[in-house]
């Protein structure tokens, strides 16, 4: 499916690039609210991705289980047996360097941990029911640890240190993906299988082209402001 740039359908936000866009497309589009917008404040097994490197670094501030228990909110139902369980963890703004304690809370479906000092996403890959993740404004370098999280629908990894778009084909339910403010230089990766993806924010990266954007996507809102884009090759009007 092609990416329509007309304001009556899909929105392409291209301001602060070097590319000239027809005047209707210059209109700034108000970003839609997502489940992540509500939080702008502040199972024991081995992970195939290894141990969080932050645990071995001086000045670490790992998440303690007592603190985690105090930060659990929102009652929902376990997808396994429909028991009432706590499904949301509010861990934003705590200066955390690792969240290993979260591995024992398998029923978590929403994790908000923006504004910390996390360098990786281990052990979130163990939370098989995770649907919403807000890990913006950390020091995360890769999204690969989210590959096992097949239930993910909303992900915010804005303002981190990610250099590669990554492979999101293992997250087929993904609807909203925010990667603004990273160091992504190309769209090489895998979004071809993300048919449900509606909102993709790649603002404030190092992109020079949109040529590798899969034509099969039906994205409603694509944000690429403040990149180095000089051409719209690969995006049909």
Image: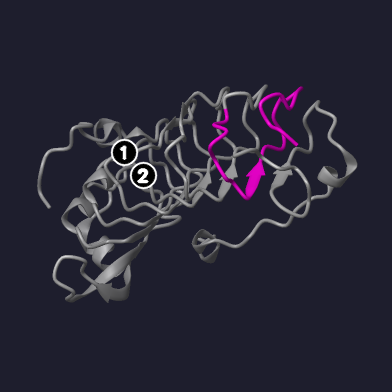
- State the residue position of label 2: 171
Quick check: marks 2 and 1 in contact, CB under 8 Å?
Answer: yes
Instruction: Please state the extent of the stretch shown in magenta in the rendering.
Output: 213-237
Q: Position of residue 150 (x, y in %)?
A: 30, 48
Taking the image as shown, residue 229 lies to the left or right of residue 20, namely left
Could you say which quadrant of the image residue 202 lies in? top right
**10 Å crowding of disc 1: few (<14), some (14-19), many (20+):** some
Place of residue 111 in the rendered image (x, y in percent of width and height, measured from the top left): 36, 57
Tell me which residue sits at (21%, 47%) in the image: 126
Q: Which quarter of the figure is the C terminus placed in?
A: top right
In the rendered image, residue 203, in percent from the top left (x then y), is placed at 65, 38
Disc 1: which residue:
147
Determine crowd level at label 2: few under 14, some 14-19, many 20+ residues with C-alpha closer than 10 A. many
Horizontal relation, residue 101 to residue 164: left or right:
left
Q: Nearer the viewer, residue 46 or 237?
A: 237
Dominant secondary structure of the magenta stretch? loop
Q: Nearer the viewer, residue 97 or 105?
A: 105
In the picture, the disc for residue 109 is: none
Q: Where is 130 relative to 81, above or below?
A: above
Of the image marks 2 and 1, the number of the one nearer the N terminus: 1
Query: Where is residue 59 drawn, in percent x and y?
Result: 33, 38
Q: How is the image coloured?
A: one colour
Q: Element at badge 2?
A: loop
**Residue lying furthest front:** 1
Decide: is 18 above or below 120: above
Locate the N terminus and report the quarter of the image it occupies: top right
Closer to the eye: label 2 or 1: 2
Q: CA distance from mark 2 to mark 1?
A: 7 Å
């Amino acid at each position: 499916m092609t990416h329509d740039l007309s304001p009556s359908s899909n929105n392409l936000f291209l301001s602060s690039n070097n590319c000239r866009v027809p005047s209707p497309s210059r209109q700034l589009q108000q970003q839609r609210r997502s489940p992540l917008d509500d939080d702008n404040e502040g199972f024991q097994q081995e992970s195939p991705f290894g141990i969080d490197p932050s645990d071995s670094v001086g000045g670490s501030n790992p998440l303690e289980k007592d603190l985690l228990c105090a930060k659990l909110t929102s009652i929902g139902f376990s997808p396994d047996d429909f028991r009432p369980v706590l499904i949301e963890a509010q861990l934003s703004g705590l200066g955390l360097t690792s969240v290993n304690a979260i591995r024992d809370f398998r029923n978590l479906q929403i994790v908000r941990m923006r504004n910390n000092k996390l360098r990786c996403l281990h052990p979130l890959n163990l939370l098989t029911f995770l649907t919403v993740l807000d890990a913006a404004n950390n020091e995360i370098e890769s999204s690969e640890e989210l590959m096992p999280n097949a239930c993910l629908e909303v992900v915010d990894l804005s303002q981190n240190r990610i250099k590669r778009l990554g492979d999101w084909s293992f997250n087929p339910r993904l609807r909203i993906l925010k990667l603004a403010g990273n160091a992504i230089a190309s769209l090489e990766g895998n979004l071809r299988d993300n048919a449900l993806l509606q909102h993709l924010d790649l603002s404030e990266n190092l992109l020079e082209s949109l040529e590798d954007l899969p034509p099969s996507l039906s994205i409603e809102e694509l944000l690429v402001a403040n990149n180095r884009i000089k051409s719209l090759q690969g995006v049909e009007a």
